[in-house]
Amino acid sequence: MKKIIFLILFFQFATLFSQNTWNPVNTGTSTSLFSLSFPTNQIAWVVGQDGLIMKSVDGGNSWNTQSSNVLNSLYGCFFPNITYGWAVGWDGKILKTADGGNTWFSQQSGTTNYLNNAYFFSTTSGIIVGENGTILKTSDGGNTWNIIKIIFKFCSYAKRRCIGI
């Protein structure tokens, strides 16, 4: 399990820092944005404060708001492909789409801890991490989430990150 978590974090940071140049883009919102997922080089989603979900189909040059039907801040999102995606956030909120973000529905997380990030290996198998060392795992597309117990945890609340063994 430690190796899986390390690989996920490594690939997320490697992807983030592999860009040569960064150009500012106007998203059309002043709402705080927290996470971004690009399942292709043209299609992307971003999530943020007050349940904001936005989608781009042109590589991030323009953005359209999608209805999440929640007011919870969303801190993480992941799309293994352009059809299926998850957004996670405050108070254990998990949202899933199976139609490219046209509709979003809630899934039961079994926790009220805020959730930071999600990673899916496929459309059925994934993990979510969050506050106080929370780790959730699914193998059925999020219909059920299993809480993974950790023996040791260290949390940096200033950085909103926890490490568990």
Image (cartoon, rainbow, N blue to C red):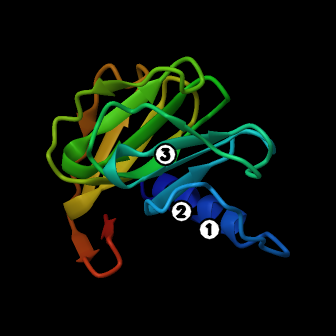
Q: Of the residues shown, which amino acid type is indicated by label 1?
A: Phe
76 with respect to 157 (left or right): right
Reading the image, the residue beneath label 2 is: 9
Please report contact status of discs 2 and 1: CB closer than 8 Å, yes or no. Answer: yes
* Nearer the observer, 131 or 23: 23
Residue at x 55%, y 42% (from the top left corner): 54
In the picture shown, does residue 108 fall above or below 45? above
Residue at x 23%, y 69% (from the top left corner): 153
Please report contact status of discs 3 and 2: CB closer than 8 Å, yes or no. Answer: no
Q: Position of residue 11 (x, y in %)?
A: 64, 59
Q: Position of residue 3 (x, y in %)?
A: 50, 57
In the rendered image, which quarter contains the C terminus? bottom left
**Dot 2 alpha-carbon crowd within 10 angstroms: few under 14, some 14 to 19, many 20 or more:** few
The numbered dot on residue 13 is 1
**Dot 3 alpha-carbon crowd within 10 angstroms: few under 14, some 14 to 19, many 20 or more:** many
125 with respect to 16 (left or right): left
Q: CA distance from mark 3 to mark 2?
A: 14 Å
Q: CA distance from mark 1 to mark 3?
A: 15 Å
**Dot 1 alpha-carbon crowd within 10 angstroms: few under 14, some 14 to 19, many 20 or more:** few
> Which mark lies nearer to you, 1 or 3?
3
Q: Of the residues shown, which amino acid type is indicated by label 2?
A: Leu
Q: Is residue 117 visible?
A: no
